[in-house]
Amino acid sequence: MVRLAEARRTEYEPHQPVFWRKALDSKERQRDWFAALLDDPSAICLVLENDGELEGMLIGTVASAPAVYDPGGLTCTIDDFVVRAPELWAEAGAALLDHLQTELKDRGAVQIVVVCGHHDAAKRSFLEARDLSIASEWWTTPI
């Protein structure tokens, strides 16, 4: 999982070097963060393996949405959703998202929010094909 996250971070960093900048000790921090999430009952951590190779991973955290949004139930925020190669979104990404949605229905969640870099065309196409829509974009500048 850490290797996939590191690969994504390396891919994202040139597109937004301030927001996606890798810390010098990013692997260690990521490992510690994932360990904490694995122990967090509000988190759902999924991986997909094929012949012993990790094809993808998804981590979502379930929480109440801010009251001003009031979607009618819990929201699952998915920050870490990565596949090993872009062509794996259709199968590995779909399998992970389908499994997550089943789990979320059992938990009473009514919506998911997925983080995706603006440059990540393969992931964006996958999400759009799965009927997700863009809810917001974050704009940033150094000061």
Image (cartoon, grey):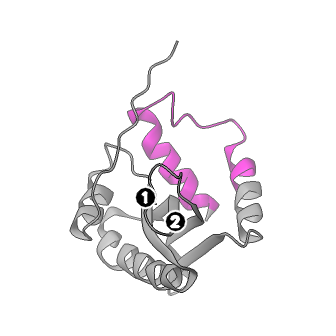
- Quadrant in the picture for the N terminus: bottom right
Q: Residue at x 43, y 58 (%)?
A: 114
Q: Residue at x 56, y 66 (%)?
A: 60
Task: Specify few, some or many for label 2: CA neighbours under 10 Å numbering under 14, 14-19, or 20 or more.
Answer: many
- Camera-side residue of 88 and 104: 104
Q: Is residue 132 above or below residue 121?
A: below
Name the chief secondary structure element in magenta: helix
Task: Specify few, some or many for label 1: CA neighbours under 10 Å numbering under 14, 14-19, or 20 or more.
Answer: some
Amino acid at dot 2 = Cys
Q: Quarter-wise, where is residue 110 in the image?
A: bottom left
Q: Residue at x 44, y 79 (%)?
A: 101
Q: Position of residue 2 (x, y in %)?
A: 63, 59
- Camera-side residue of 60 and 89: 60
Q: Is residue 116 above or below residue 17?
A: below
- Camera-side residue of 34 and 74: 74
Which SS class for mark 2?
strand
Which SS class for mark 1?
strand
Q: Which residue is mark 2?
A: 76
Q: Earlier in the sequence, mark 2 or mark 1?
A: 2
Amino acid at dot 1 = Val
Q: Residue at x 48, y 63 (%)?
A: 81
The number of numbered badges drawn on the structure is: 2
Which segment did they paint magenta? 2-30
Distance of mark 2 from mark 1, alpha carbons? 8 Å
Disc ID at residue 82: none
Residue 12 lies in the magenta stretch? yes
Disc ID at residue 114: 1
Q: Position of residue 12 (x, y in %)?
A: 44, 42
Q: Is residue 84 above or below residue 28?
A: below
Front tag of 2 and 1:
2
